[in-house]
Amino acid sequence: MDTARSGEDDGLSVTALGTGASALDNGRASVGYVVHVDEEPRLLVDAGGGTAGRLSDARIDLTALDAVLLGHLHIDHTADLPAIVKAAYQQGRGDRPLEVYGPAGNAAQPGTEAWISTLFDAESGAYGYLSDFVERYADGELSLPTTEIDAVAGRDDAVTRVYDRDGVTVDAIPVVHGRVPTLAYRVAANGASITFSGDYAAETDNVARLADGSDVLVQHRLLEAGADGPKTELHPLPEEVGRIARDAGVGTLAVSHVGRDDREALESALETVREAFDGRIVVLDDLVDIAPDGTVLETQEIRETGSGSGASRRRSEAFVFASERSDS
């Protein structure tokens, strides 16, 4: 398989803000990513604990973001959203809305609209004061228009186009993550595409269906080989990850949402993945960028100020972790 199908610069890249899980003992923030198009930050994908600080480290212009994509509403994917919303308006977002996309609810979990209201409603929200703060101190209006997406996974779910603006498209599909409504997303621009699996168990082929032909599949969690029990209702086994990446024909499998950094266990799981998938495999770390051709670069903190994303962030070569099949 050709693992460098898209060239060096497709005008699409992803900054991994956080690549950890719920545990806070491995030096990783919980999950969150920023999608850049033509060097401008356009989309925030998840906002787990620690990602607000990582946005500061990366010097990403929050006023430039168009929308937030939430895969599901667990704490390790959403905890820093209030801090990010406040910072965006405090840093000069003004009256420009910040759109939020996420799953519709079910009996086990409220939908994204109710969740956003619980946080930010001016009268009853946990952070209801923020509307007044934005108006009085930031000379703007807090606006978080929310779009809910059906997230009940079946066996033959259709890929749904949920966003199409200024050359950027986002497609979504439901995935299974226990009882919680959950979505996977695919972002495309400038002829390249990156799929975010979200948290999922491999009970359907939906991740492979959505990721079909993607340059990069950002894979959440990789259970240890031979794992069983409740975890397998939430996350895929290594052999399932390998099959999904192979069936989707992705160029690079980028492992993220790492629970604990046991290198030996991770190597063992990746060996199982490689039995099915012969493409490029990388394990992401916090504050790295990944391009459609699978190149991983370190996101560098820059102290200079600048008005645009290109002026406020730079990248340099860094080795995170990459492995190919031993017989390739």
Image (cartoon, grey):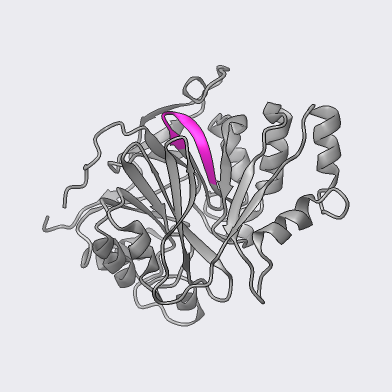
Residue lying at 57% horizontally and 31% vertically, measured from the top left = 64
Closer to us: 124 or 221: 124
Image side of residue 115 versus residue 236, left or right = right
- Toward the left, the furthest residue is 327
Magenta stretch, residue numbers: 36-44
Identify the image quadrant of the C terminus: bottom left
Q: Main secondary structure of the magenta part?
A: strand
Residue lying at 75% horizontally and 39% vertically, measured from the top left = 142
- Toward the bottom, the furthest residue is 229
Report which quarter residue 189 is drawn in. top left
Residue 84 against residue 23 in the figure, above or below: above
Closer to us: 94 or 19: 94
Image side of residue 156 versus residue 92, left or right = left
Residue 129 x %, y %: 86, 44
Residue 109 x %, y %: 66, 70
Residue 166 x %, y %: 46, 35
Residue 192 x %, y %: 32, 42
Inspect this view and state whether residue 258 appears. Answer: no
Q: Is residue 84 magenta?
A: no
Residue 231 against residue 59 in the figure, above or below: below
Residue lying at 58% horizontally and 71% vertically, measured from the top left = 180
Residue lying at 53% horizontally and 22% vertically, measured from the top left = 308
Q: Is residue 37 magenta?
A: yes
